[in-house]
Amino acid sequence: MKRLNKAFITAILPFLLAAAAPSMVSMAAEAGDTAAAAAEQAAAAEQTAADLSEADPGEEAPGEEDLKGEGGTEAADGISANSADGRLSSAPRVTRKGDIYVNATGEPASGFVSINGRLCYLSDEGRRMQGGWICPGGDWYFIREDSSVHLGWLSNNQRWYYMDDVSGKMQTGWNRIGGALYYLDRSGVMQTGWINAGNRKYYLTKSGAAQTGWMLQDEKWYFFSVFGDMQTGWIMDDGKQYYLNEEGVMQTGTQTIDGREYEFGEDGALRPSIREERAQAPE
């Protein structure tokens, strides 16, 4: 009986494989399509990141008087022991000996150290730094008067900087902080006003946060996406259609767009009678 079953299985095996082959090919094709789609999404994300990293401050940025006032948001003192770069966890603990700090071998400590659970910086002689900017390893940090590393927003000489709230390293370029997008130039200074990033345009408010939604400036209305980039062309907002010209300005009244005449209300919304004739706004 066992020989009969074996022979039977051997005989029908090619037919079973032939029947399963189309499904296997289909599954492989779907997997290939999924991988290709994932690769395209990854490439798009890398391009967006590259656009943001190459952004240059706009020449129309307002002056220092528009920057944040004193008492801006600042992260709590100290640094997590399991921080991203392990700065505190790798910082040696030191002991005070007179007016200097020494390491476990009794030698004067220097550089980044841990004092009472806080990340601090000491001179080569083991003394507390008097405060100010330092640049160990090519990265900028700001040291407080008590020798601790400053974390979070920093107001210095009427300019605003953002020091990473974990490592204390000065940040540059685009940074999302507290849910808002900020741009810090190559010197770390927070920017305000209009800036260009790749082929996109942004407006940074007086607080430094990128504008989103509607903005009125010089009696002109502009609209920015949730990502902060200024919109042009047809947009839909709150169930209404609007048209923004190449400079991002909302249009009103009678306008000729792509050879066709449209009527917009004083609020910029497309007139209902015109909207009903069109299935959707042009892309």
Image: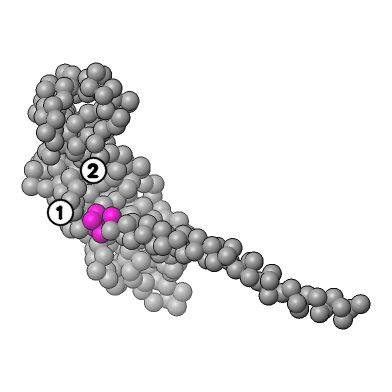
Q: Which residue is mark 2?
A: 229
**Residue 4 magenta-highlighted:** no
The part of the image, by quadrant, that contains residue 25 is bottom right
Q: Which residue is mark 1?
A: 56
Which quarter of the rendering shows the C terminus? top left
Q: Could you tell me residue 276's position as x and y percent?
A: 28, 22
Amino acid type, callout 2: Asp
Q: Look at the numbered disc 2 and give the secondary structure of its residue.
A: loop
Q: Look at the numbered disc 1 and give the secondary structure of its residue.
A: loop
Q: Disc 2 vs disc 1: which is toward the camera? A: 2
* Earlier residue among tags 2 and 1: 1
The part of the image, by quadrant, that contains residue 238 is top left
Q: CA distance from mark 2 to mark 1?
A: 14 Å
Q: Is residue 155 left or right of residue 239?
A: left
Magenta residue span:
48-53
Question: How would you classify the magenta stretch by its main secondary structure?
Answer: helix
Tell me if I can see residue 69 in this picture.
no
User: What is the total number of numbered labels drawn onto the structure image?
Assistant: 2
Residue placed most toward the observer, 209 or 90: 209
Amino acid type, callout 1: Asp
Residue 238 drawn above or below residue 229: above
